[in-house]
Image: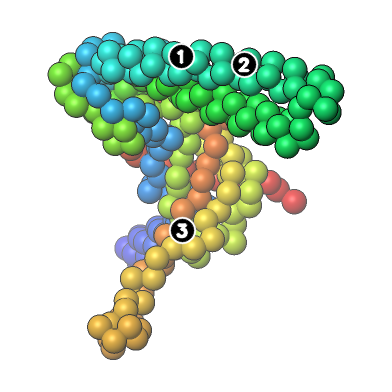
Amino acid sequence: MRTSAYLRYIITAVLLLVAILFGKYLWDDNMDSPWTRDGRVKANIIHIAPDVSGIVTSVAVHDNQFVHKGDVLFSIDKSRYSQTLIQAEAALAAQQAEKRVRSKEAARRAGLDASIVTSESREAADSLSSIAGAKYEAAAAARDIAQLNLERTEVRSPVDGYVTNLHVYAGDFATAGVAQLAVIDSNSYYVSGYFEETKLQYLKVNDKVEIHLMSGGPTLQGHIESISRGITDRDAATGRELLADVNPTFNWVRLAQRIPVRIKIDDLDKAHNLVAGMTCTVIVKPEKK
């Protein structure tokens, strides 16, 4: 009976030791291993705003549609801009005719003898020719601007990507410079991993990274592209007298700040169905020295 009791004590001690060692391993792995569950898939979001104002005549896309660079997204009424172009071309033709007349007049006076035409008359003709030339250049620029404005009535996608949150319809009035829709650049997906500041010592630019999406699917491979060099200090507010408003209390238990780390996805592919805003787990694989 005494041997059996000793055996139970030994087994209990061994199990307790294993539990302690396993707990220490988990603690060290959590504290020292460079990984985080706080990862977000992000992408460049282009806010599409027209360069000219006018009534939207047609919308060529629908919400969440994939578009190629240069595809028409929506069109603005061309009538006013077509008439402006015709007016600019007419003004350019008039200035071209005046320039031709003034140039011939200046050339003719330059070829006459000094006894017939005074030097003052020649200078006046040259001046009028130069002015006519300048007016022609201004008219040509106005014509080019009118042509550009007419072309800009068709709003096109600047990148390959997905139309999102579409809220523009035929009949709406589009104002120049005011965003009407957004396009997510399909070639710009990346991951922001938010690592505790205690783990920054284990992170280096170009370290290999595994990305596990919460939605499942294959593991993505990437590498650290850059590490943020600043975050907001929430305790450094400004008071009414423009002085620092410092929090007078301090908690003994302080949570480690999380630092954004930008991660480039090496095997970016449409088959992964990435969506900006998805969450993921990021595991860094530091190079062994």
Q: Is residue 211 above or below residue 92?
A: below
Binning the other alpha carbons within 10 Å of mark 1 as few (below 14), some (14 to 19) or many (20 upward) gives some
The label on residue 89 is: 1
Residue 243 percent location from the top left of the image: 34, 86
The answer, for residue 210, to whether it is visible in the render is yes
How far apart are the two marked residues, 1 and 3, measured between alpha carbons? 58 Å
Q: Is residue 243 above or below residue 68?
A: below
Q: Amino acid at mark 2?
A: Val
Foreground residue, 275 or 55?
A: 55
Three-letter amino acid code of the residue under disc 3: Ile
Q: Which residue is mark 2?
A: 101
User: Residue 224: x percent and y percent?
Assistant: 58, 44
Three-letter amino acid code at the position of disc 1: Glu
Give whichever of 242, 211 is nearer the camera.
242
Question: What SS does tag 2 mark?
Answer: helix
Indicate the secondary structure of the residue bearing disc 1. Answer: helix
Ranked by sequence position, the earlier of labels 1 and 3 is 1
In the foreground, 63 or 224: 63
Q: Which mark is residue 259?
A: 3
Give the percent coordinates (x, y) of residue 269. Answer: 49, 20
